[in-house]
């Protein structure tokens, strides 16, 4: 057998060597035809030890070049060959900055997919301990209500939440914000579910929600009235003489536009209450009565000096009795 092989090799050796070279070249070319190459952008994920979290990854995504059989090309196009780049850091329990190299083994991929390169391969991650803190909720709004209406208040249920997250971030936080609640063009009080903003976009964790009751009211217009006479409310049948200083006040009011535009001096009632007071000098707060929706912003002055002097039993007094 060996003698036969020697005779075969010795017969036309040049042709046999050429045939071997041609075969190798054909195999290389054929292998290139069978396999295709694609370049993809893949996010970097980390597998961490329990009680640890990630606050930053640089770069957050890397470029991965793959070779795969031509018949698997549809997996890439249709997204069926899902690729995940997950680096294992479960052995690290120390907060701080970590540098590491990405390996082909970090990429989960379909069978017969080969990793040609990962660029960049060096990644820096910021690791922190996972903690919890109870924080009040601050509602963030987007847009403005319909013209003529305003944001008058809100109610958050619950008003405080227990927030998990990186210890160093939580330590400095005094509140947790919501994702923006849209009030554009709204005019009626409504309630909605609001998502709390994650502490880290890299590792957002489980979504947390609160209920927000958004209170909308008509826009308030301001209007002032000067020289409004002060009346007084006194005991029925009293004959005491009442002196009021000052006799007139200036009022600064606010209320819905429709109510303020229709408001007249005759709609305003300003008085002091002297029912049950004995003769003497008193400083009393001003009382007011206005149409529905109109409220007092301030009165100038808002304290009235009253002097009550006893009068004849058959006199009714010089003041006005308000019933």
Image (cartoon, grey):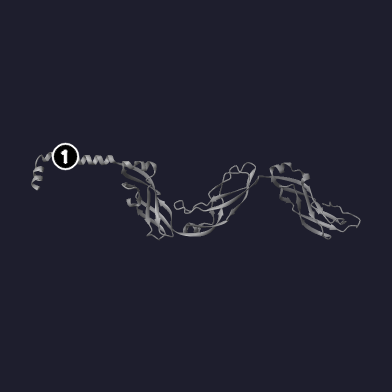
- One can see residue 115 in this view: no
Where residue 20 sits, quadrant-wise, is top left
| 210 is higher (above) or lower (below) than 218 | below
Q: Which residue is mark 1?
A: 19
**90 with respect to 210 (left or right):** left
Where residue 258 sits, quadrant-wise, is top right
**135 with respect to 46 (left or right):** right
Q: Position of residue 284 (x, y in %)?
A: 77, 57
Identify the element where label 1 is drawn.
helix
At horizontal 74% and vertical 45% (from top left) the residue drawn is: 225
Q: Position of residue 198 (x, y in %)?
A: 49, 52
Q: Position of residue 188 (x, y in %)?
A: 63, 45
At horizontal 36% and vertical 43% (from top left) the residue drawn is: 76
**283 with respect to 28 (left or right):** right
Packing grade of label 1 (10 A; few <14, some 14-19, many >=20) is few
Q: Nearer the viewer, residue 316 or 283?
A: 316
Q: What count of labels does the image hold?
A: 1
Q: Nearer the viewer, residue 217 or 47?
A: 47
């Amino acid at each position: 057998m060996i003698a036969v092989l020697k005779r075969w090799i010795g017969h036309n050796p040049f042709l046999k060597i050429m045939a071997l070279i041609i075969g190798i070249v054909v195999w290389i070319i054929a292998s290139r035809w069978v396999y295709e190459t694609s370049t993809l952008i893949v996010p970097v994920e980390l597998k961490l030890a329990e009680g640890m979290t990630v606050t930053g990854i640089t770069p957050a995504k890397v470029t991965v070049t793959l070779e795969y059989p031509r018949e698997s090309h549809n997996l890439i196009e249709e997204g069926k060959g899902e690729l995940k780049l997950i680096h294992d850091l479960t052995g690290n329990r120390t907060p701080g900055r970590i540098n590491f190299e990405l390996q082909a083994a970090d990429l989960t991929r379909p069978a017969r997919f080969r990793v040609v390169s990962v660029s960049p391969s060096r990644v820096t991650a910021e690791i922190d301990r996972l903690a919890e803190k109870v924080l009040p909720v601050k509602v963030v709004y987007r847009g403005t209500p319909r013209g003529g209406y305003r944001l008058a208040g809100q109610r958050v249920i619950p008003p405080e939440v227990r927030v998990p997250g990186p210890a160093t971030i939580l330590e400095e936080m005094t509140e947790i914000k919501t994702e923006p609640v849209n009030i554009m063009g709204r005019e009626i009080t409504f309630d909605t579910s609001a998502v709390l903003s994650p502490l880290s976009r890299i590792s957002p964790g489980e979504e947390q929600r609160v209920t927000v009751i958004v209170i909308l009211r008509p826009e308030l217009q301001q209007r002032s009235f000067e020289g409004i006479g002060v009346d007084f409310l006194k005991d029925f049948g009293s004959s005491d003489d009442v002196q009021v200083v000052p006799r007139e006040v200036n009022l600064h009011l606010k209320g819905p536009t429709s109510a303020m535009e229709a408001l007249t001096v005759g709609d305003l009632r300003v008085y002091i209450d002297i029912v049950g007071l004995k003769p003497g000098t008193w400083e009393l707060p001003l009382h007011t009565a206005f149409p529905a929706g109109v409220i007092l912003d301030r009165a100038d002055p808002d304290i009235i000096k009253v002097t009550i002097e006893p009068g004849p039993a058959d006199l009714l007094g010089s003041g006005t009795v308000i019933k």
